[in-house]
Image (cartoon, helix red, strand yellow):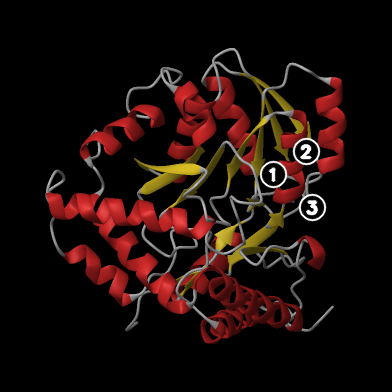
Amino acid sequence: MDRDRILLTPGPLTTTLRTKLAMLHDWGSWDGDFNAVTASVRRRLLDIVHGHDTHVVVPLQGSGTFSVEAAVATVVPRDGHVLVLDNGAYCKRAAKLTEMMGRRCSVMSFPEDEPVSAAALDARLKAVGSITHVILIHCETGAGVLNPLEEVAAVCERHGKGLIVDAMSSFAALPIDARRVRFDALVAASGKCLEGVPGMGFVFIRKAVLDGCAGRSQSLAMDLHDQHVYMEKTGQWRFTPPTHVVVALAEAITQFEEEGGQPARLARYEDNCRTLVDGMQAIGLKPFLAPRHQAPIIVTFHAPEHPAYDFRRFYAAAKQRGFMLYPGKLTTVETFRVGCIGAIGRLEMQQAVNAVADTLREFGIPTTPR
């Protein structure tokens, strides 16, 4: 095979050659040139959410989950009470890490094939006065559901509750405007819709709550307030930064801007999603979600109801054809997932459908619409 396999996953993603080439140089972690790259990345991240007046952005080493944990530990007081709106696997992860950090945590469950309800949240906040913060997963990629960020944020603001948003799989693709949506913290990462490489998260923290976050975190490495104060004072990371990841992200953001920013990125992902869903339905594979609930990030499909189907064999055969799919994350039905994001377009999505069709025919599974 004369090209890298296409990653049809929610991250890591397929990246451009320009992004890959950015990682071919070594950088001194305290050097002024590298500090300038970090400052540029932070400034341009704030540009994307129109957040310069209301928020700071704090980068952190590690996967996106590191930054979710850091955000909760930094923003939520140790005697705080967190309510997690749960309609999938990543919501459950947020609840688990909140509990492990010693914060009181309640979970409000919703079906995994539907968005969470802002109206139900409103009723819960009226009934339970001890809740201080709400956690929302903007795009729950366990199934691919888009959750109603603006409506949930409005409810939290009306009740005076803090909102922590996991925007890992939505940031830079779906519109998020800090001038219109109030959140105390919003978390994303380098290896998602910005199409950088994994290894760095970042958290937008509302300036109005920032000073109160001092000393809340029980972790030295993951204290976002301390990280912010040190960066503002020195321009440097407190501990060894992921230098190659940072410079790759800087290059990825440049390409994001050249493409036309968030609206253009969303338009390409929506086209990818339409191409994928239409093509898969044409070969007999049904999406798990109703179209009105589907975010153009990752699509969950029902597995074929055929004795020859086995995900491991299916995955291996698709990989041999140049495409890496993703296992299902649901507990109720057997599924697999296909991502629509990364440095790919309609051609790659159609090729992926063709590869799946060839795989099904190899297994003797019918490829006719149902």
Could you tell me if residue 250 is visible in this image?
Answer: yes
What's the residue type where badge 2 is placed? Answer: Val
Q: Which of 24 and 335 is in front in this view?
A: 24
Q: Do the residues labelled 2 and 1 touch (CB within 8 Å)?
A: no
On the image, the x and y values in percent for residue 41 come to: 34, 56
Circle 2 residue: 155
Residue 160 sits above or below residue 353 on the image: above
Local packing at callout 2 (Cα closer than 10 Å; few below 14, some 14-19, many 20+) is some
Residue at the (54%, 72%) spot, across then down: 265
Task: Specify which label sits upstream in the sequence, 2 or 3.
Answer: 3
Give the residue at the far top of this rendering: 79
Q: In the displayed structure, does residue 200 sit left or right of residue 304?
A: left
What's the residue type where badge 1 is placed? Answer: Gly
The answer for how far apart the CA atoms under marks 2 and 1 are is: 21 Å
On the image, the x and y values in percent for residue 283 come to: 72, 82
The answer for how far apart the CA atoms under marks 2 and 3 are is: 22 Å
Residue 284 sits above or below residue 183 on the image: below
What's the residue type where badge 3 is placed? Answer: Asp
Q: Residue 88: which numbered mark, if any?
A: 1
Circle 3 residue: 113
Could you tell me if residue 223 is visible in this image?
Answer: no
Give the residue at the far front of this rendering: 53
Q: Which of 166 and 51 is in front in this view?
A: 51
Quadrant of the drawing holding the C terminus: bottom right
Task: Specify which label sits upstream in the sequence, 2 or 1.
Answer: 1
Give the SS element for disc 1: loop
Q: Which of 54 and 285 is in front in this view?
A: 54
